[in-house]
Image: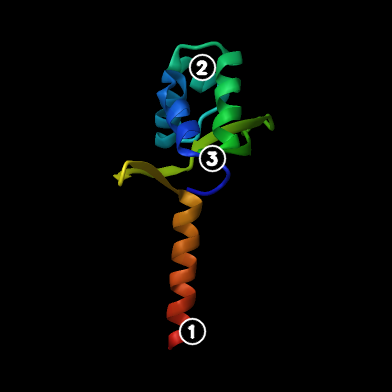
Amino acid sequence: MGRGADATTIFDLLADDYSRQILVAADTQPRTAKDLSDVCDSSLATIYRRVSTLQEHNLLEEYSTVDADGSHRRKFETTLEELHVEITDGELELSLTTRDDLADNFTALWSNLRDST
């Protein structure tokens, strides 16, 4: 699966309602912690705890933005694109694809195409 997370950890993380709500909300557009708090109907403390855990497992990325008035804001965006679960010979296997993985795959494909011409 990669990036230091095992299937049990990811399943536990995705079993949490707030974590799932954060991933879905931050997939539609980058969101501030306050936005996530409103969407998830949760306290900021809960949001920051879940955001931190999601970031530890590379499922959420943080961006810094500057508003028109010069204020700096942290926004969060989901990196998870695909989650696959396979059961083979009594073993449960989980694979994740993140946006970073897709970008890396595209870059590698493009490089290979350029090199072969």
Residue drawn at (49%, 67%) of the image: 107
Tell me whether the residue at label 2 lies in contact with that at label 3, contact meaning CB atoms closer than 8 angstroms.
no
N-terminal of the pair, mark 3 or mark 1, is 3
Compare residues 3 and 8 and report the one nearer the observer.
8
**Residue 71: image tag:** none
Between 85 and 82, the residue placed more toward the observer is 85
Indicate the position of residue 7 as horizontal and vertical percent values: 45, 37
Find numbered disc 2 in the image and state the secondary structure of the residue it sits on. Answer: helix
2 to 115, vertically: above or below: above
Question: Which badge, 1 or 2, is on the more N-terminal residue?
Answer: 2
Colour scheme of the rendered structure: rainbow
> Residue 5 — which label?
3
* Residue type at numbered disc 1: Asp
Where residue 108 appears, x then y in whole percent? 48, 69
Q: How far apart are marks 3 and 1 (CA)?
A: 34 Å
Q: Which mark is residue 37?
A: 2
Q: In this view, does 54 lie above or below 102?
A: above
Q: In which quarter of the image is residue 39?
A: top left
Q: Which residue is pictured at 42% across the width and 36% down the height?
A: 27
Which quadrant is home to the C terminus?
Answer: bottom left
Mark 3 element type: loop
Q: In this view, does 33 lie to the left or right of 13?
A: right
What's the residue type where badge 3 is placed?
Answer: Ala
Neighbor class of circle 1 (other Cα within 10 Å; few <14, some 14-19, many 20+) is few
- Look at the numbered disc 1 and give the secondary structure of its residue: helix
Residue 11, given in percent of the width and then of the height, sits at 42, 31
Say which mark, if any, is on residue 115: 1
Q: Residue furthest front?
A: 89
Q: Which mark lies nearer to you, 1 or 2?
A: 1
**Disc 3: CA contacts within 10 A as few (<14), some (14-19) or many (>=20):** few
Circle nearer the viewer, 2 or 3: 3
